[in-house]
Structures are given as structure tokens and as C-alpha cells.
Image (cartoon, helix red, strand yellow):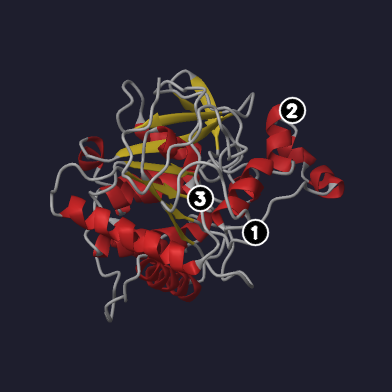
Amino acid sequence: MLRMAPLPSTILAAPPGHRSFAEPALSAVEGAQDDTVYTIMMSHTSDTHAQTGRDAWHVLDQKRRGLVGTATIGLVVQGGGMRGVYSMGALAALEEMGFNQCFDHLAGSSAGALNGAYFITGQASYGVETYIHYLSKKSFVNPFRLKKMVDIDYLVDHIGKKARPLHLPKLLSAHTTLHISLTESSHAQTHYVTNRTPDIDIWEAFRATAAIPLLYNKSVKVGNGRYVDGSISTRIPVRRVVEFGCHYVVVILTMPHSHRITSTHAWLQSLTWPATRHFSPALRQAFFGEDVAYNTTKADLSGGNPRISGCANRVVVISPKNGPERFSTITTDPQQLLQGALQAREDTWHAFGQTPPPLANPFAA
């Protein structure tokens, strides 16, 4: 049974059984689920949101200084292929602040999970440089390589293990629990594995959560199941950290607040039939259908709903600005990637009510 930890006096507990995020029920590989779902309230006012950012900064700073008894805090990182350079830039800013060991839980899907791992191990700035100088190559993204436009095997086996190695022992022993979102390939249900889950190969979990249909187009075996891109079933896994009792939640998005996912046109579904004919009906629906859960969560996090019953003033959202997209899932232009990471750094400092210090090369590893 999951229950919220005692809340600070400025935070209100949600009514039992209330739901605000219209996400499908989760079947976790690790950790029991409860009928009680805790919800998040956001305010329209920029003043309130700014105060939340300052409060969250104070909590993180206390944790950085080793003070006990501080509120629990979670971090949620959205995926998005090469858009992940934005979240990596934001994580590098948190690392620059000295907060990479201060979060109790981190939940990520797709690129967000691997980016989160590099953050937990203190390698986020290193990760930004990896996007710009390594993942921008055709070895990783090649639109003309039709069966594997995005080579997740190259990402895991060459980049993650050899060329730009993730410090795996540090990840496995970290204070922060990393929750990796996976989508079960037959029923399109969300499953989680963590850096605490026994008897799994965590590299295969990273491979699975990033296995984007059409761009990588095969499922990956993790434990006893087969999984694909974690973003298909849960693009923004906010609920996961809330269920684990986090009083404050920092959410890093890779798409503007205005972004919504609607059903794919029938003609486009027909066009992709040769590449998707092996999908289960549930996976096809999840991949091509309107994502109501995502759209509702985006509206909640953008303040589209002025009140969501539950907890007050405890969410900090870091997001690209509305307007023309700077880059896409398969953008490989190094200058565009650098600008996206620099913008994320600035957005992250401002989200906590701070001014980013001027640095000639903030991502120097």
C-alpha cells in the first residue's frame, strides 16, 4: 500500500481515491500500486509558480547540504528522441547547481530515462556534449536507413557502453531511484523497472524504453516480457513519483505547453502499414490514437485547469517556449542542438527564481 509521507504544512493531501491525471492504470514490474492516487494542483499565477520554484530550490539546497528531514522531491523527464537535448541541457543546469544527488525519485520515458541516468551519475554536461558531437552523426540518426532510422543499438552498445560510457556502478548505488518507463508490446500497458530491480539487465531496459516504433521498430526483451518505447503508454510519468510520496515534483518537458497528440490520419496509418503490420491492436491504438492522458497532463501542467484537487504549489515545470519547434525527433544539426541545450539551461535557472551565471562553455565535461 502506497501512502504519501507526512506533508509540510503548506501542502494539502488529496482526497482518497481522487484522480487528476487521466493515465491508464500501471502494472509495475517493481512496487505495489494502490487505488489511492494523489493529485497535483497548479496555480495560474506566475507569482505562485515562481514561489514554488524558490521553495523547491530551498528544499534541494538543504538536501545538497546534507540536512535531514527535508521534504521528498521527484524529477520527471519527458522523452522525444533528439529533442532530449533540451532535457539534457536542463539536467546539466541542475547538475551545475549541485543537485544531481538531491532527488529522491526520477521517472523518465524513452530518452528521458537515459538522460536521467546520466544526471544521477553526475554526467549530464557530458551528456549534452554527447548529443552535439556523437548522436548528431549518421551512425545514430539516418532517415535513409529505413529499417532503423534511429539506431538504438548504436546508442546503447557503442555510445552508452564504450564511446561515452555511463558510470553504471554509480547509478546502481545512487540515492536516487530511477524509474524507467516501458510499454508492454502486446497490451500497450506501462511497466516500470528501476535501478533497484533485481535480475534484469538495465542496459536492455534503456534499449527498450527508447525503442521508437517506425524509427527502430522492434521490441526488446526485459526480464520475462517484451517492450517498446516507454513514451507510447506514458509520455510524462508524473504519477509515478507522486505515488512514491514526493512532496515537490520538478517536470522537464521536451515539447511546448501547447503541444497535444491527436489521432493520426487514416491515410498516414495506411502508408505506414508495411512497417506496423506486426503491431498488436492495442499497440496500434496507443501509437496512432489520440493520447488523452498526455493531453490532460499537459493541460494540467500548463495551468490550463486553474485547480486540480490535491496538493498546492508543489510543481515546477521546465518547458521549451511555445512557437515554432527548434528541433524534431531526428534533428542532427549540432548548432541547433547546442542552442536547445543553452535555452534549457536558462529556462531551468529561471524556473527556480535564479539567474544563470555567465559561462563561456557551460557544458564542458
Q: Position of residue 119 (x, y in %)?
A: 31, 52
Q: Which residue is mark 3?
A: 79
Disc number for residue 281: 2
Q: Secondary structure at mark 2?
A: helix
Q: Which residue is mark 1?
A: 259
Q: Position of residue 95 (x, y in %)?
A: 27, 60
When the figure is inspected, residue 252 is found, relative to residue 360, above or below; the finding is above
Query: Distance from label 1 to label 3 (Cα)?
Result: 14 Å
Badge 1 local density, few (<14 within 10 Å), some, or many (20+)? some
Q: Secondary structure at mark 1?
A: loop
Which quadrant does the N terminus fall into?
top left
Q: Earlier in the sequence, mark 3 or mark 2?
A: 3
344 or 271: which is nearer to us?
344
When the figure is inspected, residue 323 is found, relative to residue 219, above or below; the finding is below
Q: Residue at x 68, y 36 (%)?
A: 286
Q: Residue at x 32, y 33 (%)?
A: 5
Q: Residue furthest right?
A: 267
Amino acid at dot 1: His
Amino acid at dot 3: Gly
273 left or right, relative to 149: right
Q: Position of residue 276 (x, y in %)?
A: 72, 37
Q: Earlier in the sequence, mark 2 or mark 1?
A: 1
